[in-house]
Image (cartoon, helix red, strand yellow):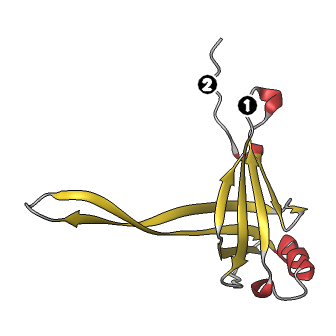
Amino acid sequence: MFNTREYEWADVSVVLAGRPITGLRGVKYSAKQEKELLHAKGNKPHSIQRGNKSYEGEITLLQSEYEALRQACGGDILDASFDMVVSYGNPTKGDVITTDMIVGCEFTEDNTEWKQGDKFQEKTLPFLFTNRKTA
């Protein structure tokens, strides 16, 4: 039997600084690498040269989750360095669990925005990190 079930938001779990995040509204992270075409004789590139890699992301939390994180960081999330574990999949539904270890995270902004009609506060916090390991 072939299972065509896709991963869904309910299957995502995040542990940030050793703490499971229940007020999670979103998470994204990416890796980039500088690349440049190497030209020599002729008008077509001979190869692609690779440079530095960089890693960045953002996490979106409810205000109450942010306050708990801020307290755990000693009052200022910009001074903290931590690891994040992101896993997704539900083995009870036949999924393979995928786990990404986001290493050496540090937030780059601590912003607040309120709008008329808001029923809750949501905070999107950008971060940099030094490596991603998949288990």
Residue 79 visible in rendering: yes
Q: Nearer the viewer, residue 99 or 71?
A: 99
Q: Nearer the viewer, residue 15 or 44?
A: 44
Image side of residue 23 versus residue 50, left or right: right
Rendered residue at 19%/59% (across/down): 45
Image side of residue 30 versus residue 121, left or right: left
CA distance for labels 2 and 1:
10 Å
Q: Secondary structure at mark 1?
A: loop
Mark sitting earlier along the chain (2/1): 2
Rendered residue at 77%/68% (across/down): 61
User: Which class describes the residues within 10 Å of circle 2: few (<14), some (14-19), or many (20+)?
Assistant: few
Rendered residue at 90%/63% (across/down): 19
Residue 115 is situated, as x and y percent measured from the top left of the image, at 68, 81
User: Which residue bears the numbered disc 1?
Assistant: 95
Residue 41 is situated, as x and y percent measured from the top left of the image, at 10, 63
Residue 14 is drawn in which quadrant?
bottom right
Q: Nearer the viewer, residue 94 or 67?
A: 94
Residue 86 is situated, as x and y percent measured from the top left of the image, at 74, 54
Instruction: Give above or below for 91 relative to 35.
Output: above
User: Which residue bears the numbered disc 2?
Assistant: 4
User: Which class describes the residues within 10 Å of circle 1: few (<14), some (14-19), or many (20+)?
Assistant: some
**In this view, which residue lies farthest toward the front?**
41
